[in-house]
Image (cartoon, rainbow, N blue to C red):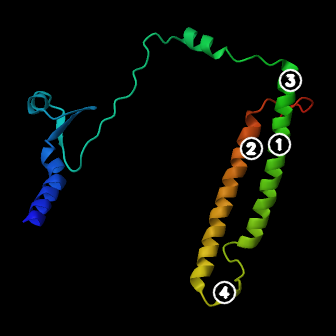
Amino acid sequence: MKRLWMLVACWGAVLAPSWAQDAIYRCGNEYTNTKPDARANKGCKLVEGGNVTIVQGTPVPKSSSPKSNSASGNNAPRVDAAQQKLRDSDSRRILQEELTKALARQEELKKEYNNGEPDKLGPETRNYQKYLDRVAELKANLARNESDIAGIRREIDRLPPASGAPGQ
């Protein structure tokens, strides 16, 4: 009898949350579980399947003006022009090195990929799926490296032109 009572109690605890869920209506960006509100507003629709959880965001302060935003950003210390040029040239040099490495890696990957038909390695002669997996991985690495190269070039283009190199 005691076991039966425990089984009923556990079963009730599991099913109780599903019984508590009322019908929920979506009215634009608002959710409500009261039927009169949903019927009064013609744009309300019944939400079916699953529970709805709404998390309230933090309110935005109403006194935000462009002047107050720019004033709060000026708390950072200013850097003189010579030091900024030095930083920019260092950034350009580092990005150029990264671009050179990425281009060299791209050439290696293209050579290994061999237009989609790389040479088979030892265990791949008996297991064709291993070969196909390696080809797919090589293709993905090529695409990822091309994306990296494009990103590095974008970063270089964002930098101010290098001094002594007109038109860059």
**Foreground: disc 2 or disc 3:** 3
Name which residue lies at 81% across and 59% down: 104
Give the mark nearest the N terminus, 4 or 2. 4
Q: Earlier in the sequence, mark 2 or mark 3?
A: 3
- Res. 4 mark: none
Find residue 83 and name its label: 3
Circles 3, 4 touching at the beta carbon (< 8 Å): no
User: Where is mark 1, residue-wise?
Assistant: 94
Left or right of residue 113: residue 136:
left
Residue 56 relative to residue 113: left or right: left
Q: In this view, does 5 lie above or below 48?
A: below
Q: Is residue 105 above or below residue 121?
A: above
Give, as a three-letter code, the residue at label 1. Ile
Q: In which quarter of the image is residue 27?
A: top left
Cα–Cα gap, marks 3 and 4: 56 Å
Q: What residue is rendered at 63% in x and 16% in y? A: 73
Q: How far apart are marks 4 and 1 (CA)?
A: 40 Å
- The kind of secondary structure element at disc 3 is helix
Q: Specify the quadrant that holds the C terminus.
A: top right
N-terminal of the pair, mark 1 or mark 3, is: 3
User: Relative to residue 65, is residue 73 drawn left or right?
Assistant: right
**Residue corresponding to mark 4:** 123
Marks 1 and 3, Cα distance to the nearest angstrom?
A: 17 Å
Q: Which amino acid does label 4 sit on?
A: Pro
Give residue 153's mark: 2
- Mark 4 residue element: helix
Residue at the limit of the structure toward the right, as seen here:
164
Give the mark nearer the N terminus: 3 vs 4. Answer: 3
